[in-house]
Each structure stands twice: as C-alpha cells, then as structure tokens.
Amino acid sequence: MVPSSLNAIKSAGLGFRMPHFADIMKRRDEVPWIELLLDNWLCEDGIVADRLEQLIKVFPVTFHGVGLSIASSSPIDEEYLQRVKVLLDKSDALVYSEHLSFSRTTSQFIPDLLPFPFTSKTLDHISEKIDFVQSFLNRQMLIENVSAYIDFPNNDFSEEEFITDLVKRTGCGLLLDVNNMYVNQVNLGRDAKSALEHLPLEAVQEVHLGGHEDAEDYLIDAHNNKVCPEVWDIYQQTIDRTGPVASLIEWDNDIPSFDVLLGEQQTAQEFLNAAQITHPATDYSTANEMKYG
C-alpha cells in the first residue's frame, strides 16, 4: 500500500532517471520510493506517460519541479501550474517541491536556477507567490535551498533567516539540499553548520544528497559524482537534529550504473538506520503538515 505522506517513509529513495527504468522495475523491492523531475513528465501520452503509469503503480512518488521560477518578477504561469496540478493529482504524489530561485524573465527562460537578493521586498513577493501556488494546487509545497556562485551586497537577511520567515508566513515545507549547503560554504564562505542551527528544521520533510564537480577555485552543483565525505558529514549533523527524514540521492549527469546509484542510496539508509536508534521516540509525522499537508 502506498503511504499517504512522505513523512510515513523516512527512508532513502532515488531520483529516477529514464536510463534506469528496466533496472528499477526489476529491483523494485530495493527502492522504497522515487522522486521524478516534474517537468520531464508533463506529457499526456506517448512512452513517457506510459512509463509514468508503470512507475506510480509500483512506487510512492514525489515530484521535483524546475520550471515554476518562484522568485522571478513575472506572475506565476497559471497554464503551467494547471498542468502541474493535473500531474500531481493523477499520480497521487506524496510531495511537490520546487527551488527557491528564478529561471524566467518577462521575455525569456533561462536554463538555470538563479539566486536572488534576500530582501524584505523579495520576501513579500515570494511569500505571496507561495500562497498562490499552495491555494491553486490545494496542497503544501516544499521549497529547496539552491547552490549559488555569487552573493548580493544588499541582503537584509541571511539565507536561513529568509527561509525561516517564508516557512512562518506561508506554511510551506522545506526540502533541505545538504550538497547545496556545502557548495555555498566553499563558493561563498557560508557556514553550513551555523546555517543548520538557524534553519527551521521542524519544517524539513525531505533531504537531498548529491555530488558536485570540483572546478578547483569553486564547486559546480553538477549532480555528477558520489556524495563526498564533507556532505555526508553535513547530512549526519542534519539528521542528528531532525531524526530520520526522507532522504534522496540525486544523480543527473554522467549517470552511473544502477548498482552505483543503489550503493549511494544504501549508504544514506545506513545513516537513517543509525538515526532511528538514537531518535527512537521521535515523531515528525505532523511537524509541518499544515492545512495543505
């Protein structure tokens, strides 16, 4: 039976990529849940729609979007959002998550997840958009912290203060990407450990784990390598505070064999198993399930 909430899982899942379709269907018992890149599954027919039908019959599914552009100055694309709603509803998705970034201007789409200044104005603007999206979809959304390669001199808040206020204002949940935290620590001099102490960890419903590319002077959030020791350390610090939480392995480029991917998933599961021992009585099932959860 498919759980009705991601909070009921608290295990390590996989970010599904199409080259692994045959493998994951054959070895379905080894994968407790999967996350799908939402924008790749908006087709209403054809092989993509057919494979989606097969996947949702077998796995609990979450959807992770890249096309909403929640921080852009332009209004939410309601036609796009309606397509998202149809997909989420027909798939009985446990979670819908998006990035705290922008990728759209009034005239063009930018194929990247771009940062923005953490100001009072952007806080008001994005809060209104999250409220609109959650009301439109009639479900809670999770927002993900993103990697960045520049910082802004006119910030009114730190990233964790900004996220905390967003959660308080809107009741949205948090998808915490610990690799992005490490990338920003290296690239921008932010302190991941300090950030963990100030983020609203009670709102974390999912954690992302992935690899990056070392470009010597900076790190690129390329999702093309194994999780590095430093990111595993931040992950450990995270679940020391949260207890077991649904965690996902992402791998988007230079996609490895399915066995390599499963090895990463199994490592994450070992962390979660240990956390279950140290947090045996922890119940986060209603920690941030607001009116949409």
Image (tube, rainbow, N blue to C red):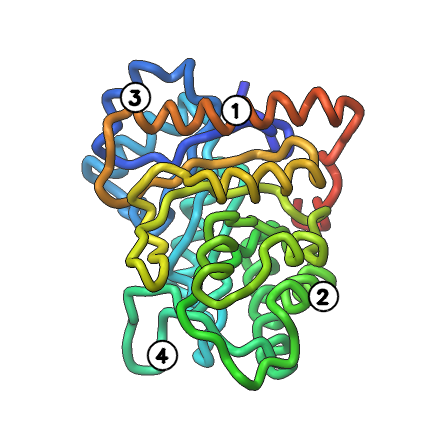
Distance in Å between CA atoms under marks 1 and 4: 40 Å
- Report crowding for label 3: few under 14, some 14 to 19, many 20 or more residues within 10 A (C-alpha): few
Disc on the earlier residue, 2 or 3: 2
Q: Residue at x 44, y 79 (%)?
A: 74
Secondary structure of the residue carrying tag 4 is loop
Lower position in the chain sequence, tag 4 or tag 2: 4
Q: Earlier in the sequence, mark 1 or mark 3?
A: 3
**Mark toward the start of the polypeptide (1 vs 2):** 2
Residue that carries the numbered disc 3 in the rendered image: 259
Quadrant that contains the C terminus: top right
Task: Describe the element under mark 1 as helix, strand or loop.
Answer: helix
Identify the mark at residue 169; answer none if there is no mark: 2
Give the labeled residue for mark 1: 269
Label 3: element kind: helix
- Of residue 192 and residue 245, the one placed in the foreground of this image is 192
- Alpha carbon separation for disc pair 2 and 3: 42 Å
Mark pair 3, 4: CA separation: 40 Å
Q: Does the residue at mark 1 contact the one at mark 4 (Cβ under 8 Å)?
A: no
Mark 1 or 2, closer to the camera: 1
Callout 2: helix, strand or loop?
Answer: helix
- Per the image, the residue denoted by label 4 is 105
Q: In the shown orientation, is residue 52 left or right of residue 126?
A: left
